[in-house]
Amino acid sequence: MIDDLKPYADYKESGLPWLGRVPGHWTIKRGKSYLFAVDERSRTGKEELLTVSSARGVVPRKSAQVTMFKAASYAGHKLCWPGDLVINSLWAWAGGLGVSQHHGIISTAYSVYRGRPSARVNPRFLHELVRSSAFQWELHVRSKGVWISRLQLTDTAFLDAPIPLPPPTEQAAIVRFLDWANGRLERAIRAKRKVIALLNEQKQAIIHRAVTRGLDPDVPLKHSGIPWLGDIPQHWEVMALKGVCAIQSGITLGKDYTGQTLREYPYLRVANVQAGHVNLSVVKTIRVTKTEADRCLLQRGDVLMTEGGDLDKLGRGCVWNAQVSPCLHQNHVFAVRPNQSRLEPRFLSALMGTSYARAYFQSTAKQTTNLAATNKTKLGMFKVLLPGMDEQHQIIATLDEELQPVNLATDRLNREIELLREYRTRLVADVVTGKLDVRAVAARLPDEVVPDAVDDDAEMAEELDSETEDASA
């Protein structure tokens, strides 16, 4: 049915760079014609806690990967209701906004807007429009600030933004069509993600066997002394990580350097450290003294490990290959520096990704609801398996060879998912800005339940909240 979509018969110029031509019967007015700002506060602080995810919009905080500390009381915090548009004023330009389906408490740094009854704005159409790639241009140019991490969108700036609006029946048709299209795309993405999960299980089994038993199936074994590990090759050593590695803590954000000479450095956050690789799509910078920077500088061959988050993030890591130099790391990321005459960094990184390491960190972590954290002491006590260096190199070389087809298949599936998401982004933008007419197609669609979005945006959800809470403290 998507292939049946055609442009509208009649268009007019909008005069807006991001919008171009719009259907002739659509109206374009300032946001204040459709919406007004509201500031309702909680009396008890007992309502559900909500947050903004750049992938899903407004969601319950318990369903997002938010690692900040909770406030002692939420009495006096802002409230939103179903149908309200909630905007993280510091991250609007990065997709930190959406129409809420929930009643609950939000950050005091968020803005809340409600539709004017006379405007007849469909909240779900508004949600798709303001989160579209096209409308991001408007949000970006209206957000002002010295630093990109502190670009703020004020109520006045947002309510002055032009908003294109079709008639109510057409808004409903657009919502119906996008629900159907998103459902199809989500099911395709979920199917590919299931295959990726199976490939990852296969990959982890190969790695676990290699780094806990070696490559020789007939090697004599001994008990490791570690209950959840069992037997290991007889000639391997077992040593606490602190005996073969230095553990470097990172830089603490928000320090006061008044009167001191500062330099700007890039630094890594939890969001940058993924299982087996570094994600450098967004690298933030920080201004610190040279002394502080020297203490937290990363070196090639460091194994990066995360301090916490959800249990899946705990202790995950990868080898730093000096992709950015110089580069620092935040205090929620440990830089583990192996003695490379005893321990190959890639062997350690592989070991940290096994179920053996997961079991250690999960059993020793400090846990709260949905969150867990380790510390330098517990990390240092982790028992490292130590084959000889030649054997470590051989294990890594064998893993590279055996995992190549698995990695290629995973990369291909991830690329297919990326293309599906790019297609969805373009489709939504074309539909909500009137480039494609969906009315006839929407009228023929069956009723469907739309699956929840597959959220790869846990790190951004965490980032949006931590930045906002700092600003509102």
Image: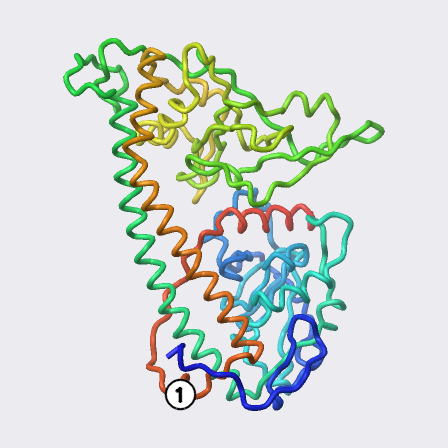
Q: Residue at x 31, y 19 (%)?
A: 394
Q: Which residue is mark 1?
A: 443
Q: Quadrant of the N terminus?
A: bottom left
Q: Residue at x 31, y 10 (%)?
A: 237
Q: Residue at x 35, y 69 (%)?
A: 184
- The image quadrant that residue 94 belongs to is bottom right
Say what amino acid the circle numbered 1 marks.
Ala
Disc 1 is placed on an element classified as: helix
User: Within 10 angstroms of label 1, few (less than 14), some, or many (20 or more) residues?
Assistant: few
How many circles with numbers are drawn on the protein? 1
Residue 343, percent across and down?
Answer: 41, 15
Q: Is residue 125 left or right of residue 39?
A: left
Residue 197, percent across and down?
Answer: 31, 47
Residue 366, percent across and down?
Answer: 44, 32
Say if 377 sits above or below 136 in the image: above
Say if 57 sits above or below 274 in the image: below
